[in-house]
Image (spheres, grey):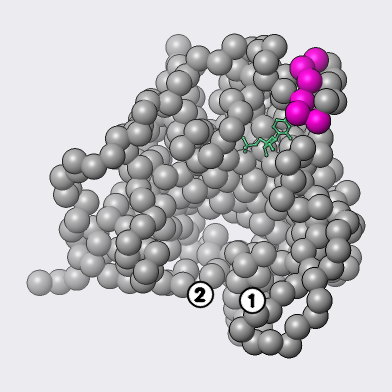
């Protein structure tokens, strides 16, 4: 019998992180009688006098959120990283190593209304969010080597507040994920003299099997090495290293791409598709002025849903003890997403 990647088990390599994933397509139809998550609540009022992220409402810190009209940024009242604090002692002990950890955590409210999102905001409102992401990268990147912008969407992803928002955690250290991507993109560039992700864009455009959406500036694919069922990678068609390098056209086209990808996600199971998403680009801080041609700026969406609006993939047993595994092939996931309309089901005329 000839090998068929959509039917037969195999391993795939993630060249960005140097990790392998087990793909087991033959298992995709196995029955499920496990946990079903409660259906996510959909109706959120535009203003909730008890929601601290709404304009005019008091936060836990006692500060009243101002009457903002566009995006609004504040320092997280419960930060995981503080700018100042006692430093741990240096240690040469190979088994008990410690390092300094300093940084800051901010929250970005996307919009003054709680009942809007990328799918329902205007293009210019989404561009305003992108401008805020760039501004924060510029400002915090002067001081910190890593500026992690991320959003948790939905209760099952640990999102604690229904108001449209994301977070930024900056640090004086490179966290593990971007550190691995830094190392692997660097090694690839040294070997092939081209940025890994620009070569990848070219190959995905040729193969066409994992494309979810593209416009003149951006390509969204389910990566060949995806671990989450409907994971996607947002890639620039023109090489850029950091968010701060995005030009006007890339910004507008990115706004368009983000509106479409979220609409497609929501259309798959007719719900607010939960995910964690965020941005990765070349390190900043002392390296901000350095050109790092091996680094390609990109976005990642990690959604957990697998079979329905309530049944998610668990990263448990084999994933925790051995390595990541998936049943649905990236090609099948991409075709499901590609076929979805570009407008959210609730907005369709
Ligand atoms: P999440 O929904 O991703 O949990 O983000 C909401 C953040 O908002 C969370 O990190 C912060 C929480 O600490 N927050 C405040 O800083 N002040 C508040 O009054 C409420 C929530």
Task: Describe residue 329's horizontal placement relative to residue 74 as left or right.
Answer: left
Name which residue lies at 19% across and 56% down: 27
Question: What residue span does the magenta drawing correspond to?
Answer: 56-61
Name which residue lies at 15% across and 71% down: 2
Q: Ligand 1 falls in which quarter? A: top right
Name which residue lies at 20% across and 65% down: 8
The quarter of the picture where residue 117 lies is: top right
- The quarter of the picture where the N terminus appears is bottom left
CB atoms of marks 1 and 2 within 8 Å: yes
Task: Describe residue 265's horizontal placement relative to residue 114 as left or right.
Answer: left
Label 1, label 2: how far apart the Cα atoms are: 9 Å
Q: Residue 296: say if magenta.
A: no
In the depicted structure, whether residue 113 falls above or below residue 84: above
Q: Nearer the viewer, residue 193 or 286?
A: 286
In the depicted structure, whether residue 61 falls above or below residue 33: above
Badge 2 element: loop
Q: Nearer the viewer, residue 73 or 127?
A: 73
User: Label 2 neighbourhood size at 10 Å, few (<14), some (14-19), many (20+)?
Assistant: few
The quarter of the picture where residue 102 lies is: bottom right
Q: Nearer the viewer, residue 231 or 339?
A: 231
- Residue bearing mark 1: 183
- The quarter of the picture where the C terminus appears is top left
Q: Mark 1 vs mark 2: which is more N-terminal? A: 2
- Residue bearing mark 2: 18
Badge 1 element: helix
Q: Residue 57: say if magenta.
A: yes
- Residue 181: x and y in percent read 61, 68
Q: Nearer the viewer, residue 268 or 335?
A: 268
Task: Describe residue 156's horizontal placement relative to residue 216 as left or right.
Answer: left
- Residue 51: x and y in percent read 67, 20
Task: Describe residue 32's horizontal placement relative to residue 264 as left or right.
Answer: left
């Amino acid at each position: 019998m000839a090998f068929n990647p959509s039917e037969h088990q195999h391993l795939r390599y993630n060249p960005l992180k140097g990790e392998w994933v087990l793909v087991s397509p033959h298992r995709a139809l196995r029955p499920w009688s496990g946990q079903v998550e409660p259906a996510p609540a959909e109706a959120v009022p535009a203003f909730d006098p008890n929601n601290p992220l709404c304009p005019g409402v008091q936060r836990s810190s006692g500060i009243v959120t101002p009457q903002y009209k566009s995006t609004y940024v504040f320092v997280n009242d419960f930060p995981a990283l503080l700018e100042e604090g006692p430093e741990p002692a240096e240690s040469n002990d190979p088994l008990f190593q410690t390092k300094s950890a300093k940084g800051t955590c901010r929250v970005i409210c996307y919009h003054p209304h709680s009942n809007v999102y990328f799918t329902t905001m205007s293009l210019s409102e989404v561009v305003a969010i992108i401008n805020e992401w760039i501004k924060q990268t510029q400002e915090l990147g002067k001081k910190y080597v890593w500026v992690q912008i991320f959003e948790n969407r939905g209760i099952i992803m640990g999102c604690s507040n229904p108001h449209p928002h994301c977070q930024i955690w900056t640090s004086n250290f490179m966290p593990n994920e971007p550190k691995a991507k830094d190392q692997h993109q660097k090694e690839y560039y040294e070997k092939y003299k081209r940025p890994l992700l620009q070569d990848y864009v070219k190959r995905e455009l040729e193969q066409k099997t994992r494309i979810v959406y593209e416009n003149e500036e951006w390509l969204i694919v389910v990566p060949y090495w995806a671990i989450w069922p409907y994971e996607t990678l947002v890639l620039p068609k023109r090489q850029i290293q950091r968010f701060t390098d995005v030009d006007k056209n890339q910004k507008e086209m990115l706004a368009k791409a983000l509106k479409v990808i979220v609409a497609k996600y929501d259309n798959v199971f007719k719900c607010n598709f939960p995910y964690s998403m965020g941005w990765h680009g070349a390190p900043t801080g002392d390296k901000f002025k350095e050109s790092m041609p091996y680094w390609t700026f990109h976005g990642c969406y990690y959604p957990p849903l697998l079979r329905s609006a309530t049944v998610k993939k668990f990263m448990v047993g084999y994933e925790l003890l051995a390595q990541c595994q998936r049943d649905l092939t990236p090609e099948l996931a991409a075709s499901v997403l590609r076929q979805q309309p570009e407008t959210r089901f609730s907005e369709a005329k």
